[in-house]
Image (cartoon, rainbow, N blue to C red):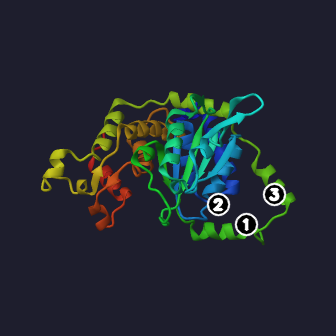
């Protein structure tokens, strides 16, 4: 373990610097901070779900400042158009030609706020950006900045005027993080740290921006983290365990027909996770091992990331809703029945 700790000393220092910087602005929410950092290292996107007022937007802004990333926030609304997101062609009358005006998606970190309030055609435009790291404007394809990181938020309790995200788009999110309420102790600290009034002067806002805008990690540090991540081993037995977990989410046609032979959890799943889930579990198990200072992944690493990787990739049946079960409940059952390697 000492050799591993020495080997990953640079990565550990970068990770702790980021956590310390986030803790200066965000009270609690360690799982949110860890999930965002893991996805950033793994090169995936994150879906954040939680009620308003839980510091989701503040956490994303703080992370972009600490990482020195070009940040853009897009408020998704029902009247949003794809051109408002990716950009459009502008006719230059003097030159008699069209020029490209790039949209806010051309940034290192994009916050898609209340993503489920935009119609399907806007979500499809974002889907190309997330999956291909490029957008098409007119007849030309334009690459997006590297790194490119999307963090999307959605409100789980308000459904009026929203559009359900299709499974194809949900599958493009590496993680789905559920943002919980703070503990009483954390909420006390939040109240004590809050300013005495809602508004603030320009000088105060500039001081806060200067304090939160000093990067502690950057593109070079991301290369270090990914270089160390590449040296983390994932044994064949761990890969087989990952594949078994994902396969256990997929009811076969025979199991669908014969209710008597089904596992008791299979009746709650209409459609299981795709191979993208297996890839995501493998990547994030290695990232979790890196966070623990190990150069090898363990079954505990897979279990640690199973919920955020799988919860948005399962399509539950009506029986799950009738019995009051969530995707996390089903995943917990699967983790308990699939044997460890």
Residue 268 in view here? yes
Q: Earlier in the sequence, mark 1 or mark 3?
A: 1
Q: Earlier in the sequence, mark 1 or mark 2?
A: 2
In this figure, which residue is indicated by the disc labeled 2? 27
Residue found at x 51% / y 50% = 47
Q: Nearer the viewer, mark 2 or mark 3?
A: 3
Q: Report if the CB atoms under discs 1 and 2 are less than 8 Å apart.
A: yes
Q: Could one spot residue 293 in this view of the protein?
A: no
Instruction: Tell me if residue 316 comes above or below residue 285 in the rendering.
Output: below
Pinpoint residue 34: horizontal percent, then vertical percent.
56, 48
Residue 165 versus residue 94: which sits nearer the camera? 94
**Quick one: SS at disc 2?**
loop
Badge 2 crowding class, 10 Å Cα cut-off, few under 14, some 14 to 19, many 20 or more, is some
How crowded pointer 3 is (Cα within 10 Å; few <14, some 14-19, many 20+) is rated as few
Q: Along the horizontal axis of the image, is 173 left or right of 194?
A: left
Q: Mark 1 highlights which residue?
A: 193
Q: Tell me the residue that label 3 is attached to.
A: 205
Which disc number belongs to residue 255?
none
Q: Quadrant of the C terminus?
A: top left
Name the residue nearer the viewer: 199 or 3. Answer: 199
Q: What whole-number distance in Å separates the C-alpha atoms at marks 2 and 3?
A: 20 Å
Cα distance, mark 1 to mark 3? 15 Å
Q: Position of residue 19 (x, y in %)?
A: 64, 48
Badges 1 and 3: C-beta atoms under 8 Å apart?
no
Nearest to the eye among marks 1 and 3: give it. Answer: 3
Q: Position of residue 38 (x, y in %)?
A: 54, 42
């Amino acid at each position: 373990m000492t050799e591993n700790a020495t080997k990953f000393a640079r990565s550990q220092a970068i990770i702790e610097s980021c956590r310390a910087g986030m803790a200066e602005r965000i009270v609690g929410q360690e799982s949110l901070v860890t999930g965002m950092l893991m996805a950033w290292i793994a090169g995936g996107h994150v879906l954040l779900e939680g009620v308003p007022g839980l510091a989701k937007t503040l956490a994303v802004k703080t992370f972009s400042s600490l990482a020195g990333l070009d940040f853009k926030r897009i408020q998704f609304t029902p009247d949003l158009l794809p051109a408002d997101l990716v950009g459009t062609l502008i006719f230059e009358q003097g030159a008699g030609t069209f020029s490209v005006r790039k949209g806010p998606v051309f940034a290192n970190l994009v916050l898609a706020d209340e993503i489920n309030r935009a119609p399907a055609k806007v979500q499809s435009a974002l889907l190309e950006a997330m999956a291909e790291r490029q957008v098409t404007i007119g007849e030309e394809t334009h690459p997006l900045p590297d790194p490119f990181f999307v963090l999307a938020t959605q409100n789980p309790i308000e459904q009026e005027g929203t559009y359900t995200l299709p499974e194809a788009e949900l599958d493009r999110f590496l993680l789905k993080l559920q943002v919980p309420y703070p503990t009483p102790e954390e909420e006390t600290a939040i109240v004590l740290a809050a300013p005495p009034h809602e508004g603030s002067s320009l000088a105060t806002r500039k001081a806060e921006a200067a304090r939160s805008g000093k990067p502690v990690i950057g593109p070079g540090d991301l290369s270090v983290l990914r270089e160390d991540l590449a040296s983390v081993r994932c044994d064949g037995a761990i890969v087989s365990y990952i594949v078994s977990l994902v396969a256990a989410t997929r009811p076969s046609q025979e199991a669908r027909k014969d209710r008597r032979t089904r596992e008791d959890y299979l009746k709650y799943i209409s459609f299981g996770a795709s191979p993208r889930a297996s890839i995501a579990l493998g990547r994030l198990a290695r990232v979790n091992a890196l966070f623990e200072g190990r150069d090898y992944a363990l079954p505990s690493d897979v279990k640690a990331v199973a919920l955020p990787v799988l919860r948005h990739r399962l399509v539950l049946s009506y029986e799950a809703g009738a019995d009051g079960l969530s995707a996390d409940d089903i995943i917990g059952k699967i983790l308990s029945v699939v044997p460890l390697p």
